[in-house]
Amino acid sequence: MSNQGIVTLPLPKGFGIEVDLESGEVRKQIAPGQYEVDQFEAVATSYLLRSAARKLLARFRWVKASGMEVPAYRVVRCGVAVIDQKQGVAIYRAIQHKRAHFGGIVQCGSVWHCPVCARKIAVRRRAELVIATNRMNESGGVCGLLTCTVPHAASDRCADVLERLQRLFDRLNSGKAAKSFRDRFAVVGQIRALEFTKGLNGWHPHVHSLLFCEKPVQWLEVGNALWSRWASAALREYGWNLPRLALDVRGGNTAGEYVGKWGLEFEVAGGSLKSARGDSFTPFGLLGQYSEGDKAAGESWVEYATAVSRMGQDRIESSRQLVWSRGLKARFQIADLTDEQIAEAQEEPSVLLGSLNFEQWLKVLGQPFDARVVLLQIASVGTFEDVLSFVNSLPECQDKTLFSRS
Ligand SMILES: [Zn+2]
């Protein structure tokens, strides 16, 4: 990669943006001759991690009935593929928050694979949780958080541990014993969240389930009732003698106490996407390690990414991250939107600054750094002319086929 130098873009309102074309670092002018690295970190980080996911999953291809070969995982096209080449790529700016975003490109909506879409979806899912727990509390009910784990070792495949966990969790929720448990504690529903971490003992998928009870309960009793069934199912299915801490139930009063546990807060925080939790990594944390050169972390992430997915009818389908029991959303009058619908929704009231044509978009994509992030920064503070002068200042990209084949 050759040193392409630094481009300085004069912007209105008395400041400018300086772009290092080699590193992609953007510095914002704060005083004459004085620049600081721009704080667009959360966006830049999630874009960086999405590019890592794209790189790792691009090798998985899907051959359609028509014989056409396409990427198997939607994240590979996310933020890159143009929906209509004639329309090009629209650039919008939110009226209130002034943040720019793209329109007319594919948004994958994959919570497991895409840090950009996961952030957006987490904001919405978090709001739904807050509504549901508040309504339950208002009507005199209570919520408690159940956590279920299964044993695992460094040599276990992620998919195998996940399958065992799901099997036991299905056991816990089916049959006569499950019904009498629900009757006994007035359980009207639950929201199951699947979560993954990877530590020294390998992949650790686990289930957090938010239980909704119509009347106050003793959480210790709830925990003991679930534990005895979890332990006997584990013994019967796999011959395991589980330690008591394999299952935990605790009550809580506010939604905030749950969302932190579920990792939704973590996704929303954005800037901390790359960090580890204690001595274990989240999947996006592994992507961060990979983007810093750790190839083993990348392969480990692929093991997880393929474990949460299976071949569907005409594409790869992924497990749902959050599953509400039947009727629970309707009970709390919450609209049932899919992750894809959330990802595709317009973020907030915005103005259209202008559109890039397909050639210009390829030029943006073909840079050695992520010019999309820089472009969004410029579009957040400048005019569409500023955006165009940035695009014009970029060197012609070398490999135009790279991004057009999708
Ligand atoms: Zn996406």
Image: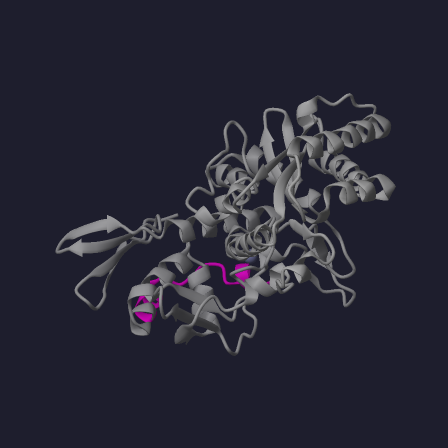
Q: Quick check: 365 left or right of 41? A: right
Q: In the image, residue 317 lies at what x, y percent?
A: 71, 54
Camera-nearest residue between 220 and 307: 220
**Image vertical order of residue 91 relative to residue 265, above or below:** below
Q: Which residues are magenta?
A: 388-405
Q: Quick check: 33 left or right of 57? A: left
**Image vertical order of residue 232 relative to residue 4, above or below:** above
Q: Residue at x 28, y 68 (%)?
A: 382
Q: Quick check: 344 left or right of 396? A: right
Q: Residue at x 54, y 38 (%)?
A: 286
**Image vertical order of residue 399 relative to residue 194, above or below:** below
The quadrant holding residue 125 is bottom right
User: What count of labels does the image hold?
Assistant: 0
Q: Residue furthest left?
A: 32
Q: Residue at x 41, y 50 (%)?
A: 42
Q: Is residue 404 magenta?
A: yes
Q: Look at the image and tell me in which quarter the C terminus lies.
A: bottom right
**Image vertical order of residue 73 relative to residue 162, above or below:** below
Camera-nearest residue between 245 and 23: 245
The answer, for residue 317, to whether it is visible in the render is yes
User: How was this image coloured?
Assistant: one colour
Q: Quick check: 206 left or right of 345? A: right
Q: In the image, residue 245 lies at what x, y percent?
A: 66, 25
Q: In the image, residue 48 lies at what x, y percent?
A: 46, 49
Camera-nearest residue between 231 and 402: 231
Q: Quadrant of ligand 1?
A: bottom right
Q: Residue at x 50, y 55 (%)?
A: 123
The answer, for residue 106, to whether it is visible in the render is no
Q: Is residue 286 magenta?
A: no
The quadrant holding residue 402 is bottom right
